[in-house]
Image (tube, rainbow, N blue to C red):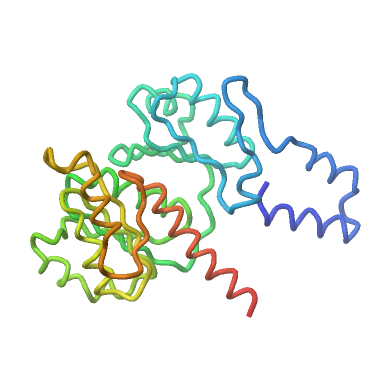
Amino acid sequence: MNRAELDTLLRSVAAGETQPGDALERLAESPFADLGFARLDLHRELRSGLPEAVFGQGKEPDDLVAICRRLLAAHQRVLATRLEPRGAEALRAALPEATWHPRARVLTCGTPHAAKKCKVAVLVAGTSDLPVAEEAAVCAEWFGLGAERHIDVGVAGVHRVLERLPELRQCDVAIAVAGMDGALPTLIAGLLSVPVIAVPTSVGYGASFHGLAALLTMLNACAPGVAVMNIDNGYGAAVLAQRIASTGDRRALDT
C-alpha cells in the first residue's frame, strides 16, 4: 500500500462508503512478508515513496522468483537490479510480462510509477560506463522521470559536453556517471544550476582501484552542489533524483 491508496481508503471510510471492518482487513497485512529466507518490507512505499527494490546479485534464481512474485502481488509492480544471468533467465521465464533491460541488468514488471514533471540528464563519460548509466536511466524512467542520455561526453574531449549545453540547461537534475579520473561531475556542476548526482564507476586501469579513485575525485569536487553515490550505484542516483522531484511535487501541492 502507498500513501495515495491509504488516503483513498481513509476517505472512503469517512464518507461511509467502506465499512471500518473492511478497511481493517485491508490494513491487517503485516508490514513485512516473511518468506523464510527473506523478510520483505511491504510498507516501504508508504514511508518513503518507493517500494522495496530487489538487489539481484548473489541471490539464488528460485529465491529471486519468490521475492519478485510477492512484491508484485503487494504493489502491482516490482523492480530488480544488478541481475546475474541465471537470475535474469529465471525471472524472465517466471514473469513473461516483465521487461528485461540487459545492459542495465535491470528487470521491471507491472505498472510504472506515475509520471512526474522532472527531466533528468544522464551524462555518461565513456561507453564503458554505460551499464551503470543505463541502470540510473532505466530506474529513473521506471520512477516516472524523463531521462535523456548523453553518451561519451567525458572531460578528455570537453567540447563534447559544451556542444550539449543548450539541451543540458533544460534538465531539472543531472546524473554524471564516470570512471577513470571521475572529473565529469565537477565540470557539470560548474556549468549547470541544477542538482548534480555523481556516480563513480569501477572502470579504469590499475591505479583507479576499481572506482575508488573516481569516488575520491567526486567527493573532492571543487564545484558545489554535487551529491556522490557509491561506486557503480546507478540505482541510488535514480532514487535521489526521484526524491528531488517528489519534494518539488509536495511543495507545489502546499502552495
Q: Is residue 205 left or right of residue 164?
A: left
Q: Residue at x 11, y 40 (%)?
A: 205
Q: Quadrant of the C terminus?
A: bottom right
Q: Residue at x 42, y 28 (%)?
A: 92
Task: Looking at the picture, tell me which residue is in the foreground, 17 or 83.
Answer: 83
Q: Is residue 44 left or right of residue 90?
A: right
Q: Residue at x 55, y 28 (%)?
A: 67
Above or below residue 100? Residue 93 is above
Above or below residue 201? Residue 194 is below
Q: Residue at x 48, y 35 (%)?
A: 54
x and y, in percent, of residue 234 in the image: 35, 48
Residue 118 falls in image quadrant? bottom left
Q: Is residue 213 left or right of residue 47?
A: left
x and y, in percent, of residue 242 in the image: 47, 58
Q: Is residue 168 left or right of residue 97?
A: left
Task: Looking at the picture, tell me which residue is in the foreground, 206 or 204.
Answer: 206
Above or below residue 64? Residue 155 is below
x and y, in percent, of residue 27 in the image: 78, 42
x and y, in percent, of residue 245 in the image: 49, 65
Residue 41 falls in image quadrant? top right
Task: Looking at the picture, tell me which residue is in the foreground, 10 or 194.
Answer: 194
